[in-house]
Image (spheres, helix red, strand yellow):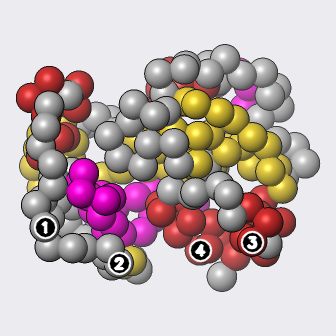
């Protein structure tokens, strides 16, 4: 498994204002080793503070039948990478939950995509990365990449999760980053996309 190391660490402590009331303070993630072997269950908010705790995560890349990828802009209320563009859904499986089941759940919650709209959900990659976000927190994840193709592109996004949606030709996005400079892309998506074309 390859590792993408931190590139933006200031060494300073992060803001903890309102952490006690943040919804993530009531959730858990699965801490893992570099090979994605489960270690323990940890508090989700604590896993994203300070130097972070390496944990299990996933990103799901959603395509239409013309190989366009669906980019989803993260809601401005997100603690980390708010208003950045993701491709398409990213989250963490619950303890004991398979990545595929977690992906199906988040697709339905965030975008209103039901399993009858696709039939090819598959895990295609896994990588470790670590990135700091301003002074708010850190992602240190072993990130699974899952892909699927929508036969029915009907969407019903949850505004608390998604601020915007955009279909983009996937190869063109990769080959012409200057054309999309105004889109700030989430680091885990940039890594997943780069690995797709390497």
Disc 4 to disc 2, how far (Cα)? Answer: 18 Å
In this rendering, the count of numbered labels is 4
Residue 54 is situated, as x and y percent measured from the top left of the image, at 21, 61
Residue 65 is situated, as x and y percent measured from the top left of the image, at 87, 43
Q: Which residue is mark 1?
A: 12
Q: Which residue is mark 2?
A: 7
Q: Which residues are magenta?
A: 116-144
For residue 169, say whether it is visible.
Answer: yes
Q: Work out whether 178 lies above or below 100.
A: below
Mark 3 in CB contact with mark 2 (< 8 angstroms)? no
Q: Which mark is residue 195?
A: 4
Q: Earlier in the sequence, mark 3 or mark 4?
A: 3
Of residues 39 and 85, the one nearer the viewer is 85
Mark 1 in CB contact with mark 2 (< 8 angstroms)? no
What SS does tag 4 mark? helix
Q: Nearer the viewer, mark 1 or mark 2?
A: 1
Q: Earlier in the sequence, mark 1 or mark 3?
A: 1
For residue 53, say whether it is visible.
Answer: no
Disc 4 crowd, CA 10 A, few/some/many (<14, 14-19, 20+): few
């Amino acid at each position: 498994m390859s590792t993408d190391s931190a590139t933006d660490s200031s060494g300073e402590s992060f803001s903890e204002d309102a952490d006690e009331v943040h919804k993530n303070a009531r959730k858990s993630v699965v801490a893992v080793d570099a090979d994605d072997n489960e270690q323990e269950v940890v508090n989700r908010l604590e896993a994203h503070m300070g130097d972070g705790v390496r944990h299990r995560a996933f990103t799901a890349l959603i395509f239409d039948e013309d190989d366009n990828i669906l980019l989803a802009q993260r809601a401005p209320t997100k603690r980390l990478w708010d208003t950045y563009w993701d491709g398409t859904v990213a989250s963490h499986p619950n303890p004991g939950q398979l990545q595929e089941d977690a992906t199906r759940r988040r697709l339905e919650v965030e975008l209103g995509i039901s399993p009858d709209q696709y039939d090819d959900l598959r895990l295609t990659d896994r990588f470790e990365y670590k990135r700091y976000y301003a002074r708010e927190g850190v992602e240190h994840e072993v990130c699974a990449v899952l892909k699927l193709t929508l036969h029915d592109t009907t969407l019903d996004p949850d505004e608390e999760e998604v601020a915007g949606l955009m279909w983009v030709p996937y190869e063109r996005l990769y080959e012409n980053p200057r054309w999309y400079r105004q889109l700030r892309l989430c680091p885990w998506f940039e890594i997943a996309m780069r690995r797709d074309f390497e």
